[in-house]
Image (cartoon, rainbow, N blue to C red):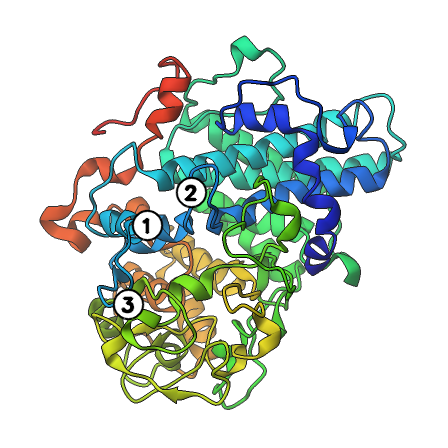
């Protein structure tokens, strides 16, 4: 899907074409809804050619990039999905050696599990989720607008792709809020825009129905110019993941076994000595390879990559190529003396470091510690890592290291990086498959997947944890460190009290709906208990 970013010249204009609908449903206020769209392009003269529909689908993908966006407009986002999925967990604490600005304080608040419905991260992600759903719905509805030039096969493919994206967003909303609204139609009545809470049963059904339709309508592979777009096997793999969250173990097992047998996915396992296999996964030159089920795509480098407009509804969005600010927030902080000019907000915890076994190569790939050589933009030869750059002594290395220090992976200004977000990869699927097996009583089969596939890939023997679920929980934590899943694992396993002790509240099993959305709905949307 690098091509999706390359085509951003069309994509970044497109959101403005539907500004009225997007601003209403995404919760961005505007008091003049009759303004002419930019370039005088409207839904009435768009959605005609296959190229139009490509642009519209890419706009829905683009909303996913904005989960990690940084913007000086709208809600003044600062990579809010990291605050939600990292700062909340036991894997990360806020680095007190970094710039302790008001923006970092938002993540610090979540690090302390001081969770409130007014917090900007929840409003930001809610906005992006429903923006992506809106854009998917526009594609689906306009395939039947009576004026387009799509063939029957093209309609089938565009609807399937849009349904995958709609399911992706609805599933994330379910993980975060439990009973968020189901939005399957484009609202046309300005007086009836608000939607009520769904039930989990209805939401699971809507998500799974969309994923099954996506599986039926998407191609098994795309050509090279469309690398990274969702395939039928992307949809099928997500179906199994949703089944795990639903605790439908037989369904999950059946889906995962289909994916294992027929998809072509596999672990990156090309080095017989096991030395580099895990690091290969996060090499920017090895994006979208066989371990990738779904990656969030980033482009660049471009000379105008401006960190502060990483939001495709920003008024300067046409200048941005939608890189990621990961390096800005993750790499060691300039304020503590580190090279590279970055912020360094997030420090790995001692608890996470201790979770790795002696000799596990995933530790060195994931975390910088004393004695390591540090790399970032402009530091391609490396410098000694200084534990004083972090309040825990550690910094995140995953997606970094010597392989990713090349200038081609960074904007010229050093703010943006272009290494894709590995959102769902085959190792994650294997561990979900192992979990479904263990929960179904097939403990030896589940342990075989953990030991003979995930652990064997990095040269490790049998798990040190004898009990099936203990082994599974251990392996997910070290394999998937700093990927967007730890918080959702904690909540679905119900282990919050064990992990956080007296800081834990039962309410934390779900996040609060943004108070602004409840107010905007005139109370139709109900708040989760405890907020």
Residue farthest to the left, as pictured? 502
Q: Quadrant of residue 11?
A: top right
Question: Looking at the rendered structure, which numbered label has been put on residue 103?
Answer: 1
Residue at 70% across / 53% down in the picture?
A: 4
Dividing the picture into quadrants, the one containing residue 292 is bottom right
Circles 2 and 3 in contact, beta carbons < 8 Å: no
Q: CA distance from mark 1 to mark 2?
A: 9 Å
Q: Secondary structure at mark 1?
A: helix
Of the pair 220 and 50, the residue shown nearer to us = 50
First of labels 2, 3 by sequence position: 2
Give the position of the C terminus as an image quadrant.
Answer: top left
Q: Between residues 227 and 83, which one lies in front from this camera angle?
A: 83
Q: Residues within 10 Å of mark 1 (few under 14, many from 20)?
A: few
Rendered position, 438 above or below 372? above
Q: Point out residue 128 in the picture as x, y percentages from the top left corner.
A: 51, 38
Q: Quadrant of residue 474?
A: bottom left
Residue 437, position in %: x, y? 41, 55
| Alpha carbon distance from label 2 to label 3 | 26 Å
Nearest to viewer (mark 2 / mark 3): 2
- Residue 356 position, x and y percent, is 29, 75
Q: Residue 274's spot in the image, x, y percent?
A: 48, 86
Quadrant that contains the N terminus: bottom right
Between 180 and 13, the one nearer to me in the picture: 13
Label pair 1/2, CB-CB below 8 angstroms: yes
- Which mark identifies residue 348? 3
Sequence-first tag of 1 and 2: 2
Vertical placement of residue 440 versus 157, above or below: below
The answer, for residue 156, to whether it is visible in the render is: yes
Decide if residue 499 is on the left or right side of residue 404: left
> Residue at position x 52%, y 39% from top?
169
Q: Name the N-terminal-most of marks 1 and 3.
A: 1
* Residue indicated by mark 2: 76
């Amino acid at each position: 899907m690098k091509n999706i970013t390359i085509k951003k010249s069309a994509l970044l204009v497109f959101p403005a074409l539907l500004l009225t609908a997007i601003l209403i449903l995404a919760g961005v206020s505007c008091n003049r809804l009759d303004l002419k769209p930019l370039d005088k392009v409207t839904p009435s003269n768009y959605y005609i050619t296959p190229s139009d529909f490509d642009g519209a689908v890419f706009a829905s993908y683009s909303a996913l990039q904005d989960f990690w966006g940084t913007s000086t407009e709208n809600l003044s986002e600062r990579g809010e999905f990291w605050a939600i999925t990292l700062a909340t967990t036991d894997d990360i604490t806020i680095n007190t050696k970094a710039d302790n600005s008001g923006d970092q304080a938002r993540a610090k608040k979540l690090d302390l599990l001081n969770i409130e419905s007014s917090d900007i991260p929840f409003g930001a992600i809610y906005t992006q989720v429903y923006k992506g759903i809106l854009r998917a719905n526009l594609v689906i509805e306009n395939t039947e607008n009576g004026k387009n030039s799509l063939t029957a096969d093209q309609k089938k493919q565009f609807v399937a792709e849009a349904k995958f994206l709609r399911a992706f967003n609805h599933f994330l909303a379910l993980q975060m809020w439990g009973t968020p609204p189901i939005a399957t139609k484009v609202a046309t009545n300005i007086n009836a825009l608000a939607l009520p809470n769904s039930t989990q049963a209805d939401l699971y059904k809507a998500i799974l129905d969309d994923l099954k339709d996506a599986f039926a309508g998407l191609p098994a592979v795309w050509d090279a110019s469309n690398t990274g777009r969702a395939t039928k096997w992307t949809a099928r793999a997500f179906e199994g993941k949703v089944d795990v969250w639903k605790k439908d173990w037989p369904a999950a097992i059946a889906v995962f076994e289909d994916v294992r047998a027929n998809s072509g996915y596999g672990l990156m396992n090309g080095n017989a000595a096991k030395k580099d296999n895990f690091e290969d996964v996060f090499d920017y030159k090895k994006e979208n390879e066989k371990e990738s089920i779904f990656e969030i795509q980033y482009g660049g480098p471009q000379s105008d990559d401006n960190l502060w407009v990483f939001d495709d509804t920003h008024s300067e969005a046409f200048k941005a190529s939608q890189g990621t600010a990961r390096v800005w927030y993750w790499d060691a902080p300039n304020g503590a003396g580190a090279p590279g000019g970055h912020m360094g907000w997030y420090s790995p915890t001692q608890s996470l470091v201790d979770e790795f076994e002696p000799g596990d190569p995933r530790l060195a790939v994931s975390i910088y510690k004393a004695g390591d050589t540090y790399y970032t933009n402009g530091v391609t030869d490396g410098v000694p890592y200084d534990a004083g750059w972090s309040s825990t002594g550690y910094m995140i290395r995953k997606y970094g290291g010597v392989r990713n220090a090349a200038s081609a992976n960074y904007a010229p200004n050093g703010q943006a990086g272009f290494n894709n977000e590995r959102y769902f990869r085959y190792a994650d699927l294997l561990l979900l498959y192992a979990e479904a097996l263990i929960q179904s009583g097939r403990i030896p089969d589940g342990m075989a997947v953990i030991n003979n596939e995930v652990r064997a890939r990095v040269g490790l023997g049998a798990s040190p944890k004898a009990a099936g679920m203990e082994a599974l929980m251990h392996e997910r934590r070290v394999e998937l460190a700093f990927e967007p899943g730890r918080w959702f694992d904690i909540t679905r396993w119900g282990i919050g009290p064990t992990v956080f002790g007296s800081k834990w509240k039962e309410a934390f099993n779900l996040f609060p709906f943004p108070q602004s959305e409840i107010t905007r709905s005139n109370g139709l949307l109900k708040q989760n208990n405890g907020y």
